[in-house]
Image: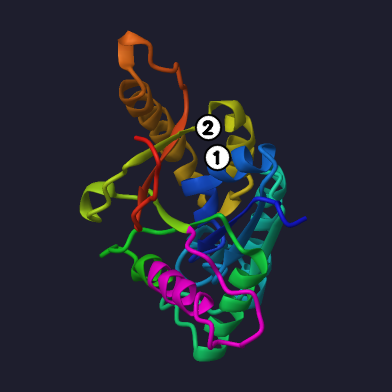
């Protein structure tokens, strides 16, 4: 359908989309969007310590376990589509062909908006690299001279979801999204990530804290919406509006 709304999530590792924008995915799916998730890697080397501590752990076995978790989480969020580029992590590096494969996905999805990581992350450079790749591939997807004849990309907003240690990343939210109505779905997706149980309560608490910010910025005690869970995002590109 020509008028079908869509969104694209570019996640460095197989679990990142769950913690940071699972609510946005579930909410927009409920609103009729087709949400595509692209995991650039499984996070098999650096994001899977619990799995590596198991007897007989292997690289392919860890990858398979992370993929299974991510697919289960995507299903819990009712995500339209999840794809894995298997580019490897720690470090995450995409070659030219892998970038063009991502460009192909972007053009096929024609997202109304995109989601990825903060632009700076001194603790995990895979995250900031993923956003650099997202911006580069967004640019290529807009180029009329790249694979002429294909439908070029318009100008979707790129929203940066919240990093793990916000104060260290230079990330400043300018959008808060109420995810109260889909919180049960996000929590179910969180609980699919058995390799990182230590993060379950952290991201639950974060959603509650961001809901406090949503309430305050939507009017506070003078009529703000009583959000219980929310996610924060930082927009990269200017937004064109007719009214404020």
Q: Of label 1 and label 2, which has the lower sequence position?
A: 1
Whether label 1 touches label 2, CB < 8 Å: yes
Numbered tag placed on residue 179 in the rendering:
2
Q: Residue 58's x, y, as percent?
A: 62, 75
Residues rendered magenta in the picture: 131-156
User: Seen in the image, is 65 located left or right of residue 98?
Assistant: right
In the image, 168 versus 178, the foreground residue is 178
Which residue appears at 39% of the width and 65% of the height? 127
- Establish if 183 lies above or below 235: above
Q: Residue 29's x, y, as percent?
A: 67, 43
Specify whether residue 18 is painted magenta.
Answer: no
Q: Residue 32's x, y, as percent?
A: 70, 42
Total labels: the figure holds 2
Numbered tag placed on residue 234 in the rendering:
none
User: Seen in the image, is 168 located left or right of residue 82?
Assistant: left
Whether residue 56 is visible here, answered yes or no, is no
Specify whether residue 136 is painted magenta.
Answer: yes
| Residue count near mark 2 (Cα–Cα under 10 Å), binned few <14, some 14–19, many ≥20 | many
């Amino acid at each position: 359908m020509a008028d079908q709304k869509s969104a694209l999530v570019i996640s460095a590792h197989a679990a990142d989309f769950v913690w940071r924008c699972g609510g946005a995915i579930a909410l927009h799916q409920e609103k009729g969007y087709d949400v595509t998730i692209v995991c650039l890697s499984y996070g098999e080397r650096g994001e899977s310590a619990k799995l590596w501590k198991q007897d007989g752990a292997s690289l392919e076995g860890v990858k398979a376990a992370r993929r299974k978790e991510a697919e289960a989480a995507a299903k819990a969020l009712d995500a339209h589509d999840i794809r894995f580029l298997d580019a490897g992590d720690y470090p995450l590096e995409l070659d030219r062909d892998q970038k063009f494969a991502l460009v192909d996905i972007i053009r096929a999805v024609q997202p109304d908006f995109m989601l990825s990581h903060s632009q700076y992350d001194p603790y995990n450079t895979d995250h900031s690299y993923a956003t650099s790749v997202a911006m580069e591939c967004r640019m290529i997807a807009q180029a009329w001279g790249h694979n002429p004849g294909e439908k070029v990309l318009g100008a979707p907003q790129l929203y940066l979801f919240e990093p793990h240690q916000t104060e260290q990343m230079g990330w400043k939210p300018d959008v808060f999204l109420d995810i109260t109505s889909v919180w049960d779905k996000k929590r179910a997706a969180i609980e699919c990530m058995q390799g990182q149980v230590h993060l379950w309560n952290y991201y639950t608490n974060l959603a509650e804290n961001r809901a406090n910010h949503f309430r305050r910025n939507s009017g506070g005690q003078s009529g703000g919406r009583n959000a219980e869970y929310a996610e924060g995002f930082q927009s990269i590109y200017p937004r064109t509006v007719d009214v404020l």
